[in-house]
C-alpha cells in the first residue's frame, strides 16, 4: 500500500515552454502533497505544500507564478513549470500524506527528471 | 546555520562492515526522526522512524536518537552491496514539513 506515482518519469523540453508533472496517490487519499526539487548530489528542497481544494503554500524563494501547483482531488496534484529555462532542470519529487497521520508518514513518488534545453 | 547537518560522506566500506550515518540538529521542536534511502534517480524510501530518545531496531538497521545532544544516527550491520545508496535523515515537528539533511552516499563493495 501507500504507492505514489509520477508522470512523466523524465521529460526534455525547450526553453520557454511549459511542462506539467502529475503526482498521484494510487491506493490512499492524499489530503496533503509536497513538491520537492533535488539538484545533483544535493538534498531535497521543499518547494510547496498543497492541501486538497486549497491554494498551495510556497516556500520562501519559490516563485508561485512560475511553479503552478494544483491539488484538484484527493489523489492528484500537478506541478506546472511555466516558461521553463535551463536553470529549472532538476529532479522533481512529490510526496503525499493522508489526514490523521503523523508527520513522518509521507510517501514519495519516483521523481521526474526535467531537462530544459 | 542549517537546522539539520548530516555527515557528508561519501562512505565506502567492504561488504559485511558496520556503517554509521549521523545527523545533528538545532531545533528542539523536532519530534519525529526519520531515515530515508534513495537510490540513484529514484524517490526516497522511508527506512525507519522514531520519536523518542533511544534505539530502535529493524533487522540490520538501528536508529538511535539522543535528544539531549540533538544527535541521530543510523547503523547498518552486515552491510550488503544492495545497501549502496544515498541516505537522508529527516526531522519533523509534526507541522507537516520535514527538514532533510543533505544526504550521505554509501558504497558497499563486494
Image (cartoon, helix red, strand yellow):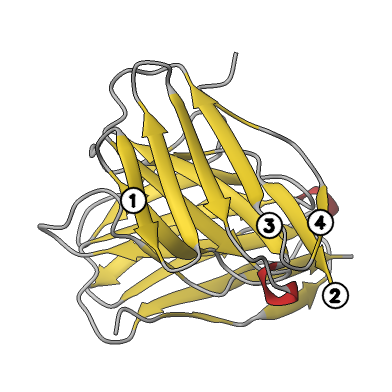
**Residue A100 vs residue B67, the one in the foreground:** B67
Give me the disc on residue B13.
4
**Residue A26 vs residue B78, the one in the foreground:** B78
Task: Specify whether B27 is left or right of B5.
Answer: left
In space, the residues marked 3 and 2 are separated at their CA atoms by: 18 Å
Compare marks 1 and 2 and give the one earlier in the sequence: 1
Q: Chain of mark 4?
A: B
Q: Chain of mark 2?
A: B
Q: Is residue A75 visible?
A: yes
Please report contact status of discs 4 and 1: CB closer than 8 Å, yes or no: no
Q: Which residue is mark 3?
A: B86
Q: Chain of mark 1?
A: B
Callout 1: helix, strand or loop? strand
Q: Which residue is mark 1?
A: B56
Compare marks 3 and 2 and give the one earlier in the sequence: 3
In space, the residues marked 4 and 1 are separated at their CA atoms by: 23 Å
User: Which of the 4 quarters of the picture holds residue A90?
Assistant: bottom right
Q: Residues within 10 Å of mark 3 (few under 14, many from 20)?
A: many
Residue farthest toward the right in the current orientation of the protein = A117
Compare marks 4 and 1 and give the one earlier in the sequence: 4
Q: Residues within 10 Å of mark 4 (few under 14, many from 20)?
A: some
Task: Specify whether B65 is left or right of B82.
Answer: left
What residue is drawn where x is 31% and y is 78%?
A: A2
Residue A8 at what x, y percent from top left?
A: 61, 82
In space, the residues marked 3 and 4 are separated at their CA atoms by: 14 Å
Amino acid at each position: 500500500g501507500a504507492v505514489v506515482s509520477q508522470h512523466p518519469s523524465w521529460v526534455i523540453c525547450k526553453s520557454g515552454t511549459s511542462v506539467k508533472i502529475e503526482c498521484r496517490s494510487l491506493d490512499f487519499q492524499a489530503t496533503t502533497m509536497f513538491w520537492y526539487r533535488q539538484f545533483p548530489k544535493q538534498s531535497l528542497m521543499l518547494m510547496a505544500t498543497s492541501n486538497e481544494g486549497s491554494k498551495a503554500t510556497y516556500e520562501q524563494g519559490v516563485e508561485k507564478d512560475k511553479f503552478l501547483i494544483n491539488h484538484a482531488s484527493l489523489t492528484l496534484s500537478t506541478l506546472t513549470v511555466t516558461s521553463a529555462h535551463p536553470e529549472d532542470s532538476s529532479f522533481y519529487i512529490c510526496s503525499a500524506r493522508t489526514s490523521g497521520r503523523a508527520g513522518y508518514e509521507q510517501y514519495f513518488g519516483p521523481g521526474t527528471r526535467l531537462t530544459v534545453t | 546555520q542549517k537546522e539539520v547537518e548530516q555527515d557528508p560522506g561519501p562512505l565506502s566500506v567492504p561488504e559485511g562492515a558496520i556503517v554509521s550515518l549521523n545527523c545533528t540538529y538545532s531545533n528542539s521542536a523536532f519530534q519525529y526522526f526519520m531515515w530515508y534511502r534513495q537510490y540513484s534517480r529514484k524517490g526516497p524510501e522511508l527506512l525507519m522512524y522514531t520519536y523518542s530518545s533511544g534505539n530502535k531496531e529493524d533487522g540490520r538497521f538501528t536508529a538511535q536518537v539522543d535528544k539531549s545532544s540533538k544527535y541521530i544516527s543510523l547503523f547498518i550491520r552486515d552491510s550488503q552491496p544492495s545497501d549502496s545508496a544515498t541516505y537522508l535523515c529527516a526531522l519533523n515537528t509534526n507541522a507537516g514539513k520535514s527538514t532533510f539533511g543533505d544526504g550521505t552516499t554509501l558504497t558497499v563493495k563486494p
